Image (cartoon, helix red, strand yellow):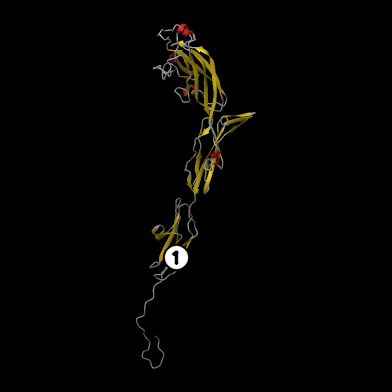
Amino acid sequence: THQWIGHYQFESNRIDVLVYSDLLDNDTLVYPLIVDPFVTWGPFAGAGLMGSRASPGVCTQSLTVSFPGGSEPQDFSAEWEVDASTVLNCCENGFACWMCEAQVWITSSCGGITPTGAPGIVWVCDIPTCTVCNTPGLWGPTLGYGADGCPSMISCYTPSCAAQNMTFFFNLNRTFCSDAFGCDCNWATNGCNALNSWSVTLRGRTVEQASNLTSSSGTTLCEGTSTTLSATGSFGVPPYTYSWNLGGPVVTPPVGTTTYTVITSDACGNTATNNITITVLANSTAPTAISTTANPICPGNLTTLTVSGGSLGAGATWNWYSGGCGSGFIGTGSSISVSPGSTTTYWVRASGTCNTTSCASVTIIVNSLSTAPTSVSATVNPTCGGATTL
């Protein structure tokens, strides 16, 4: 048999959880999906018509609950119902009790809040004005999680894999008791205000991880960079152990995107899973040569230089130089056209986000131009029909 309780369904040793479909369909989310790290235990109820005593006297009732193992106690909440009616001992013979005459405080095995000392929190019904509570009836407040003094009630409990008992004490007394004519009825030991019921609900947290895992070198790296991945366990029961996939926590990720997963286990064997994605950018590789469309060339002619070999990495370009490797920048691109006036050496290299490579070079030879003759000479001139050399 099974039934739905809120967003949960229990069947045998299995719990089914309702999850919004847009969470499961969202490709930007990292799985597995953590539904709820909190453990809520209770409410545990105490009951019985426990009377009140005039301050500084007090009536006390205790409630012992067993907190489940494997969870770190975090907080508790409480509810109660105090009856200030006209039928209790103090209110015979026409006396009326007011809700505002009651005051409550809660203690526990840890100590908690007391009516004296610091901080000395006492819960009362609309004191000091006593307007809302200036009637007989029921005072039924709720102390929510994080209310004054609540976390201190369980601060002394050490997280344990075994269940542990926690005892809480509900304390009730009254400041005075009067009828409609202002008569004092403090002679009554008990009564006037009485506790109908009270309850506590405990909250703890099983093992969790910090929302973001960390990488010592960041989440965007250059090719060949190593990084140390770190996870931090919390709550549950320490100490924690960490199991990484893909060889973590010290890794040298490949170019591209890699997701690393860590499983954090506490001393009880409970686990939490988280992921971190590392993006690795490619390095550039050096060119091996420069090809030309013509070499040597005549003055005034163009030749096109083209990179051979090598590759561009992330954010990289081919940069050309005429004054040395990295000196005398003349342009970018895989090819460039030049027309040197004299023999010149050109260099090219890749420069990008991750690295700058070494250069390849080529020397373009510029031939000298021919010049026009100014005269012609002869070895014999004039000649008598014999041979002559010009």
- Residue 376 lies left or right of residue 284; in this view the side is left
Q: Quadrant of residue 384?
A: bottom left
Residue at the right extreme of this rendering: 1
The crowd level at tag 1 (other Cα within 10 Å; few <14, some 14-19, many 20+) is some
Residue 201: x %, y % from top left: 52, 23
* Residue behind mark 1: 304
Residue at the left extreme of this rendering: 374
Residue type beneath disc 1: Thr
Q: In the depicted view, which residue is nearer to us: 307 or 111?
A: 111
Q: State which quarter of the image contains the C terminus.
A: bottom left
Q: Quadrant of residue 69?
A: top right
The residue that appears at 46% across and 16% down in the rendered structure is 104
Residue 258: x %, y % from top left: 53, 45
Q: State which quarter of the image contains the N terminus.
A: top right
- Residue 196 lies left or right of residue 385; in this view the side is right
Secondary structure at badge 1 equals strand
